[in-house]
Amino acid sequence: MPNANRPTGLSPVRSLDSPWMGQANVYSIAGDCNSAVAIGDPVKSSGTASSDGYAGITLAAAGETIRGVVVGLGRSPTVMANWANLDTTVRAAQASGPVWYALVVDDPDAIFEIQAATMAATDVGANADLVAGANNGFVSGYTLSGTAASATAQCRILGLVNRPDNEFGAYAKMLVKINEHELTSTTGV
């Protein structure tokens, strides 16, 4: 049975040595961030902070070092919700507007599930970059590149997600660890 083509970005599933327990940290998204941000998107540090002291983030593009993955969005750092629309799971791109906040899984040992363009058993252990895709209005459209190599890339491919609706080939759901992570690099923003 072929795999379904339903990208959802990166979803945390566990840590290297334990289940994922929902740990995440609050970051800010500047009011003039001109990129839409969705749950499941990889982000990087923006080099700024909000007026209330939360470090800033913006989307990470292919090949860039990643700070973490968005798992929650909101208009307040204490409540991840948009009071104007409680169904909102995407912060729209805007030239100006209020600061938003994001819960970000920034643990360098977190393992994520992500849909790949195509993967084979021989790709396990290799590295691959992320590919930006448009969100569907609810979750990220990011996927894993089908080009796996030994050269440095954003993610290390750990294996296939083991479940009946998933197999190697097109749109395989893979387990990855962020390889190029800001918290394991000695280079600043």
Image: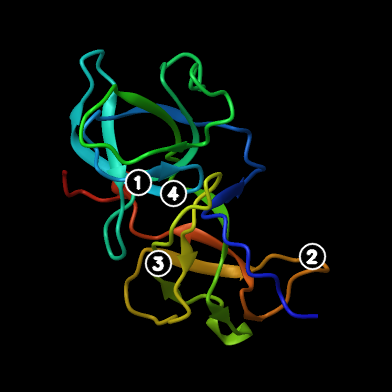
Cβ atoms under marks 4 and 2 closer than 8 Å: no
What residue type is disc 3 on?
Val
Cβ atoms under marks 1 and 4 closer than 8 Å: yes
Earlier in the chain: of badge 2 and badge 1, it is: 1
Q: Give the number of callouts.
A: 4
The picture quadrant where one finds residue 127 is: bottom left
Q: Nearer the viewer, residue 26 or 158?
A: 26
Q: Which residue matches tag 4? A: 41
Earlier in the chain: of badge 4 and badge 2, it is: 4
Residue at 49% over, 58% down: 141
Q: Which residue matches tag 1? A: 43
What residue type is disc 2 on?
Arg
Q: Tell me where residue 107 appears, x and y as whole percent.
A: 45, 41
The picture quadrant where one finds residue 120 is: bottom right
Earlier in the chain: of badge 3 and badge 2, it is: 3
Q: Which residue matches tag 3? A: 131
Q: Nearer the viewer, residue 128 or 172?
A: 172
Q: Residues within 10 Å of mark 2 (few under 14, many from 20)?
A: few
The residues tagged by marks 1 and 4 sit, at their Cα atoms, a distance apart of: 6 Å
Earlier in the chain: of badge 3 and badge 4, it is: 4
Q: Which residue matches tag 2? A: 163
The residues tagged by marks 1 and 3 sit, at their Cα atoms, a distance apart of: 13 Å
What residue type is disc 4 on?
Asp
* SS for dot 2: loop
Cβ atoms under marks 2 and 1 closer than 8 Å: no
**Of discs 3 and 2, which sits in the foreground?**
3
What residue type is disc 1 on?
Val
* SS for dot 1: strand
State whether residue 93 is above or below residue 100: below
